[in-house]
Amino acid sequence: MTDAHPSVRPDRRAELAAGLARVRARIADACSAAGRDRSEVVMIAVTKTYPASDVLALASLGVTDVGENRDREAAGKAAEVTTAGAAPRWHFIGQLQRNKCRSVVRYADVVQSVDSVRLARALDAAAVAGRDRPLDVLVQVSIDGDPARGGALADSADPDTGLGPVAEVVAGADGLRLAGLMAVAPLGWEPERAFGRLAEVARGFRAVHPEAAALSAGMSGDLEAAITYGATHVRVGSALLGMRSTLR
C-alpha cells in the first residue's frame, strides 16, 4: 500500500510524515552511535487512541509494524484497516486478560506482553483454535522485580510468573512461537540502568533460547538508550503521532 486512503486528511498525513522522518533519523543516529546496522531495529508505531486513518497513513508512508494496547480498540481498528486494504504487522503490547485471548489471536501477529504461565496456556489454546499458524510471543520481563507493574520475574522460579517457567511453556506450545523478550523501563530508573539490566537478562535468556532473539524495549523518550543496549524493536507513540489532545 503506497497511496493514502481517502479517509486520510492530507494535512494529517504531512504531520505523520514529518514525525516519521524525525523518528527514523533518531533510530539511524542511535544505531550508528552503537555500531549497529539500521536494519537491526524495527520501529513499532503505537497507535492506541489514534484512528484507523492514522494507521492507513502510516502504512502508506512505509510503516510495517503497528502496536496496540487494548483489545476492544485494536480489534475494530485492525478490521477497519484490513478492509481498507492495508496489512501492517499488528503487535499487542498491553496487559492482556485471559478472557481476551480468543479475540486477540484473530488479528495480532505478535503478543508482546505474556508474563505468566496461566496467560501463556490460555493464549496457546486460543491460538490453536483460532489461527492457522503459530502466534509470535515475546515474554514481558520485569526489570525491577515489582510484580505490581507486570512482567515475568527474571530471578524467580515461581511456577506461574518466573521467567524460566513462562518461557518454557511458550517454547513448548503448539500454537505459539517464542520470539524474545519485551520490557518497559521502570519509573524513576535512568534508561541506561534499566536497559543495561535488561541486556544482562537477555544474554542469559538467549543462552537457553538462542532462537528467541527479539528484544522489544524503548519508547519515544528513551529509544536511543534501548538501541545502545541491544533493542531490536522500539515502540514509538507520541514522538511519531503527536499528543492525542492536539488532534481534531
Image (cartoon, grey):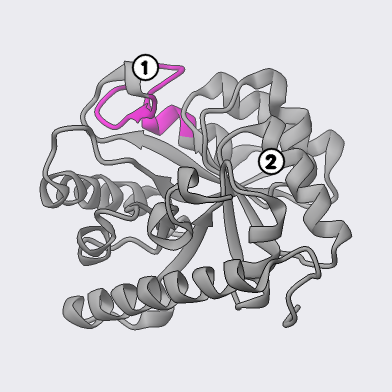
Q: Position of residue 136 (x, y in %)?
A: 62, 50
For mark 1, does the 10 Å Cα neighbourhood hold few (<14), some (14 to 19), or many (20 or more) residues? some
CA distance for labels 1 and 2? 31 Å
Q: Nearer the viewer, residue 222 or 134?
A: 222
The reply, left or right, for residue 233 in relation to residue 202 is right
Classify residue 139 as left or right of residue 129: left
Q: Nearer the viewer, mark 1 or mark 2?
A: 2
Q: Which mark is residue 158?
A: 1
Q: Position of residue 197 (x, y in %)?
A: 17, 45
Q: Which residue does the image show at 29% across and 60% down from the upper left?
A: 223
Q: Which image quarter holds the N terminus?
A: bottom right
Image x and y of residue 241, in percent: 48, 58
Residue that lies at the very extreme toward the front in this rendered image: 248
Identify residue type, mark 1: Asp
**Residue 205 seen anywhere in this rendered image of the structure:** yes
**Picture mark count:** 2
Q: Which residues are magenta?
A: 150-166
* Displayed quadrant of residue 234: bottom left
Q: Which residue is mark 2?
A: 74
Q: Secondary structure at mark 1?
A: loop
Query: Magenta residues: mostly which secondary structure?
Result: loop
Q: Does the magenta-highlighted stretch encompass residue 156?
A: yes
Q: Looking at the picture, does residue 10 appear above or below residue 180?
A: below
What residue lies at 38% left-to-right and 29% top-to-bottom? Answer: 151
Which amino acid type corresponds to the residue marked 2 in the rendered image? Ala
Q: Nearer the viewer, residue 62 or 105?
A: 62
Earlier in the chain: of badge 1 and badge 2, it is 2
